[in-house]
Amino acid sequence: MPSIPVDVLLEILEHVGRADLARLCLVNKICYSCAKDVLYREVHHPGERGIETLAQSIDLAKRVRSFRCENLYPGLATALQNMSSLRNLNLKFIRDASIMDGCTFKLDSFIGSFHDSESLRTFLRNQPSLTDLTLYTPVYSSWLSPLEGMCLPNLNRVTAFSCWQDVLISCTSVPRILTQRSH
């Protein structure tokens, strides 16, 4: 095969299915390098082996931009810590926010089902670029206190039970779009 410029190869790979991307990783070093960028950009429902791979390979995990997982697998916390370039995170059905302790990524969007905890609050305080937030878990405590002011200055959209709204509105600079979920 004659040499294909890398920028052309990258454009081609954007239109290749996941199974074929995995096969292209076996062709040669150039194809592997380019295909793994596309293959690992969006990881949805990775399963236990996928989580193990991301927990063990910082090189692959740092390529993930969008991640969705609905099960608390062993190694998930380590995999998340390795995803330094992550921008969109969906951890629906996972309740323990401590799995995000030590994560350094800065998200644009976040979907979660976490109960209010210090881990969740610390995580949200460290997400200044967050623009879209969805929280699926209702808060059953009447003592829920607001987050410290201005920790989410770019938040544009919140989808949450009404009990979260006072907590979240206090940490934005301007009233934003809020979507309520009923109990």
Image (cartoon, grey):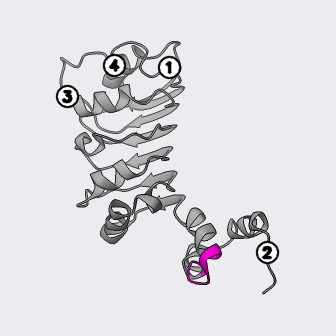
Residue 81 in sight in this render: yes
Report helix, strand or loop for mark 4: helix
Q: Amino acid at mark 4?
A: Val
State which region is magenta. Answer: 24-31
Residue positioned 29% across, 56% down in the render: 76
Q: Residue 33 sits in which quadrant?
A: bottom right
Quarter of the N terminus within the rendering: bottom right
The quadrant of the picture occupied by the C terminus is top left
Residue 52 at x, y percent in the picture: 31, 66
Q: Residue at x 52, y 51 (%)?
A: 65
Q: Are marks 2 and 4 in contact (CB under 8 Å)?
A: no
x and y percentages locating residue 178 in the rendered image: 48, 24
Q: Which residue is mark 3?
A: 140
Q: Secondary structure at mark 2?
A: loop
**Residue at mark 4:** 167
> Residue 158, percent across and down?
46, 29
Residue underneath mark 1: 153
Depth check, front residue: 134 or 84: 84
Residue located beneath label 2 in the image: 4
How far from the left and from the top, in percent, is residue 129? 51, 30
- Residue located at (57% from left, 77% from top): 25
Q: Nearer the viewer, mark 3 or mark 1?
A: 1
Q: Which SS class for mark 1?
A: loop
Amino acid found under the numbered disc labelled 1: Pro
> What residue type is disc 2 on?
Ile
Q: CA distance from mark 1 to mark 2?
A: 44 Å
First along the sequence among labels 1 and 4: 1
Q: Alpha-carbon distance for marks 3 and 1? A: 26 Å
Residue 25 is one of the magenta-drawn residues: yes
Closer mark to the observer between disc 1 and disc 4: 1
Q: Are marks 3 and 2 in contact (CB under 8 Å)?
A: no
Question: Which dot, 3 or 2, sits closer to the camera?
Answer: 2
